Image (tube, rainbow, N blue to C red):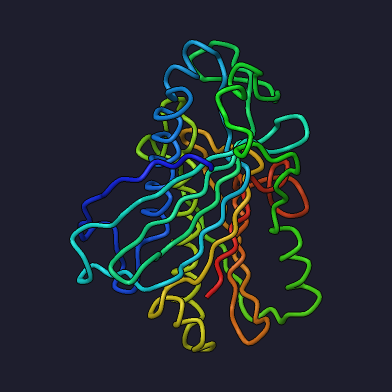
Amino acid sequence: MPRSSTYEVVLDASLFTPAQLQPTAVGRLAFQAGTRWLRDHVCGHRTLVSEHRVGFVLWAWQLEYDRPLRFPDADEALVDVRARVRGPRSSQLEMEMTVSGPAGVAVRTRATSVPLRLSGDQALSGAPTTLPDSFVAGFHDDEVERSPYLSPVRGLLAQFEREGERIASHTTTFRVHRHHCEVADQWYWVESLGFAGGAREECVLRHGRKVPELRRALAEGIRRVDATWLRAGQLWDQLRVHTTVHRHGGRVAFVHELGLADGGSADGFDGGPYAIVVEHV
């Protein structure tokens, strides 16, 4: 049976909007949970980076809200996390987390990372690689999946364009400051969810009067998030977040493309988007 790490977290008001756990708060809980699983069962994150010269870059993340969990509901929540190696050549590390409150599982996340062989510099530079055999050996047979995880983001975008209706668009800029970064002075991936959430709110403020259904994104919260990361933002980068809103299947989805501002390419990004975040309302 796949191993899990299960523990209690104390809840405080900073983790919530009026409607739900904040997506960025869930992201922080998920990152901590994955790090804890590695420490408990295979190898601590610090040891992996500093001694084995292996790092991970998050490639795809999925968040689903199952049952309500709001600040007045509970003093604590139960976190459960499991991990597995994926891909025919052990090219992915996948973490699945649930956060449960009094009504049961409130949120589910799936994080899929790809490994890097680190060069040893302070910037944690690295090149794509497969997971070392010594690392994979720490996983049980039922924690190894030979098929790779495939991100749904590109398929969702094509579906929205083919079957949906574009009802609004907006562009917002942010700068990556040090409090948005991790130890290597590149953005902490959770903060890019925050940039997307900020862009959603700016879009609602701009277009909410003309398109009242957008306001539901603020009043009722988000149902699901699908995200993929293609490149990492760096300290002091000026980011452009281009948001398009689609009506599809009776619901609304916000698509945020994050990249460098003032890019020279046709889409306005230098070298294409750094990340794409889809928020389903």
Which residue is outermost to the right?
162
Q: Residue at x 43, y 62 (%)?
A: 107
> At which x and y percent is residue 209?
47, 88
Q: Residue at x 59, y 65 (%)?
A: 243
Q: Is residue 19 left or right of residue 255?
A: left
Which residue is nearer to you in this view: 226 or 99? Answer: 99
Q: Residue at x 55, y 14 (%)?
A: 53
Q: Is residue 72 left or right of residue 145?
A: left
Against 34, residue 50 (above or below) is: above
The quarter holding residue 59 reads: top right
The quarter holding residue 242 reads: bottom right
Q: How many marks?
A: 0
Which residue is outermost to the front?
1
Against 94, residue 161 (above or below) is: below
Which residue is nearer to you in this view: 201 or 6? Answer: 6
> At which x and y percent is residue 122?
48, 15
Which residue is nearer to you in this view: 213 or 132? Answer: 132
Against 36, residue 224 (above or below) is: below
> At which x and y percent is residue 195?
47, 54
